[in-house]
Amino acid sequence: MAAHFGRRLRKGAATTAVAAAAVAALAASQAPGVSTDDAGRQTTGADAAPDATGGDGTATGNSRYYTDLPPLDSPNPSPTTGTTPPVVTGDAEAGIPATVLDAYKKAEASLRDSKPGCNLPWQLLAAIGKVESGQARGGRVDAGGTTYSPILGPVLNGNGFANISDTDHGLYDGDSTHDRAVGPMQFIPSTWAWAGRDGNGDGKKDPNNVYDAALAAGHYLCRFDHDMSVQAQMNASILSYNNSTAYLNTVLSWLEYYRKGTHEVPDGTGALPSHNSDDTSGASPTPTPPAPSRPSPKPSTPKPGDGGSTSPSPKPSTPSTPSTPSPSPTPPTPTETVDHLEDADTAKLTATAGDTFAQKIAVRTETKASKAVAKVRVRFTIVGDATDATFTGGETVATVVTDSAGKATAPALVAGEKTGDFTVRATVVGRVMAGLDYTATVTPRQADTLTRTSDTALTCVPGGEFADQVEVKATYKGAVADKVAATATLIKSADDATENDKGPYFKDADGKTVRTLTDLTTDADGVLKLPKLYADDTTGTFLLRINTTGGATLTVELKVAAATS
């Protein structure tokens, strides 16, 4: 959590033994996937995973979060002595403000439709919301879910936190020098720029709105096809939100607690946490050992009768001061050793609209001597607004850590409906150097065959209307060709494809005669049903020609003849 939450409630001092016992019990009973080592430290089996973040490497910038753990399941407050307040009961802590709870549940429902394989439980969003902002400061939001005042994290200027220069010109965080995490789910601006969502349908993506923030957090966790029902994948997603094992354990504890049951409380009445990850006020200061005293030379006092003469006192020896060894030079980080990016045999990037690209972009980070560099973050960005293509998971930015061979492979690209070329740029996070640009091409959906769905003859009397509408089905290489563009024209003859000026016709919205239809598209089943056809007073056999992208063509006969008596 990166927010400075003003004046915080302070719990009374509890004994170290009681606190340690509570934490140990919670860690053991309420954090699935968490264990302890021989020294009692909490560990987890979370796998390292690529993240789709900005330069910070996490959604929040690895900044401050609440460390309060859920209470032990006890129906009554624990006995206390003195002025120490009672332990909060489970029922009080289980309450989630009404609007905040509604936002979590709506986000879960949305992800169930858009990313069903993620299996995102709303309780996970609630756990992160608790740890990040205390459920939007106990539910201090208006009726639309927007916080009454922005929830801002500490300035990320490198003083105790990451050093992230301003990326939003102060738009979200009010700081034009450095970034700060913003809102109930504590997104830094550079992450919100691509992860932000409109969760309440008001046309805006506001990190201070709990509906927008909850939906964005859900998509962030579910990117790269992570499945929250798989513990290792859930752990990896949580760690990508804030890369701390202690953070992971705290979130998992609240997740398990909320899964055991929760309830709605009025907005603004939620329980507020008291302790955060950089709060040292409750810790006993470490005493500084006193510096060793040096013996002072004691002057000798002349004894009576010795004529005032004094014997020189032995001069005390001064202990030699040990020389301070020169600090060893700090070895460069892997990122600092990178000199350039090299393509790692990326194939030509081409896909049909709506399909996933079969090829993936792969690059390699290398030193000046062309030696591979592992553990370096490479950012892949879909550049510009000329395309609606995304990476798997719906994002336009993805950050991947290079493997032992220095190779980073971007997630699969998914083509949108916009056709043409677009650019994907690979850059090294934390280094100023030339990136690599890749051109990807989205081709239109195609059909190679058109057939009528009925063999009924299409006939009409002069001045009447055809009883049956023309309906065709498009396929491509035997498969259904959905969303394929098509045109339909009433032509003069089989050899003259120009538009006819007599015979059958369509009507536009104003009832006017139209003999060419454009902007037609097959449906999800590859079917295209044309509007009704009408006939003027001309009799004879006429032709309707339908063309699709990809070259499929079908010519349909239309007959206009006087009715037989």
Image (spheres, grey):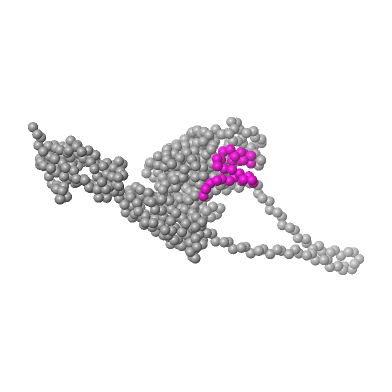
Front in this rendered view, residue 329 or 169: 329
Residue occupying the point 62% across, 62% down: 327
Residue occupying the point 24% across, 48% down: 552
**Which of the 4 image quadrants contains residue 111?**
top left
Is residue 35 located in the magenta-colored stretch of the structure?
yes
**Which of the 4 image quadrants contains residue 506?**
top left
Residue occupying the point 15% across, 50% down: 495
Quadrant of the drawing holding the C terminus: top left
Asked whether residue 273 is in view, the answer is no
Residue range corresponding to the magenta coloring: 19-48
In the displayed orientation, state which residue is furthest to the left.
565
Apparent side of residue 409 relative to residue 528 in the rendered image (left or right): right
In percent of width and height, residue 131 lies at 53, 43
Is residue 299 located in the magenta-colored stretch of the structure?
no
In percent of width and height, residue 158 lies at 53, 55
106 over 403 or under it: above or below: above
Residue occupying the point 20% across, 38% down: 455
In the displayed orientation, state which residue is furthest to the top.
75
In percent of width and height, residue 297 lies at 79, 63
In the displayed orientation, state which residue is furthest to the right.
305
